[in-house]
Amino acid sequence: MAFEIGIGINNTISKMKTKKQTSIYKQAQRFADVTKQYIATGNISRAKHCLAVAAKLMENGNTEMKNAICNVYVFSVSGFLEIHHCAIRNLFPEKLLTEYHKQVNTS
């Protein structure tokens, strides 16, 4: 599984880099939408995989990628989970959970 995540991350990073820089935020939103759809349909294993990929992108990406994951992806997915009364702590990897807590504490 770790190998699959590594391949997915490399493919995702290279696809995001080939687009205009302003579209990284749109792609992060689309990735969040896909993750939310998996959660809504009960496909938690795929949602957790998406969250793990997002955490790796936040950890290994450039500054703009990290900002897109933090400001768009985490904000969008966590808002969805809050509205639907889902346990964020049970789904988010540690890196994303830390970012979520930062966002909650600053608002």
Image (tube, rainbow, N blue to C red):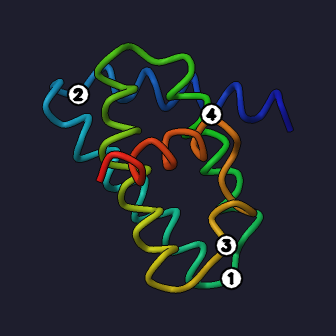
State which quadrant residue 46 falls in: bottom right
Q: Nearer the viewer, mark 4 or mark 3?
A: 3
Asked whether 48 or 34 is in front, the reply is 48
Question: Going 83% across and 31% down the picture, which residue do you hit?
Answer: 2
Q: Earlier in the sequence, mark 2 or mark 3?
A: 2
**Left or right: where does residue 68 sit relative to residue 87?**
left
Image quadrant containing the N terminus: top right
Q: Quadrant of residue 52?
A: top right
The residue indicated by pointer 4 is 8
Q: Residue 19 carries which label?
A: 2
The residue beneath circle 1 is: 42
Q: Residue 21, image x and y in percent?
A: 18, 24
Q: Position of residue 27 (x, y in %)?
A: 30, 45
The 10 Å Cα crowd at callout 2, few under 14, some 14 to 19, many 20 or more, is few
What residue is shown at x 18% (from left), y 37% (from top)? Answer: 23
| Amino acid carrying mark 2 in the image | Lys
Mark 3 and mark 1 lie on one chain; the one further toward the N terminus is 1
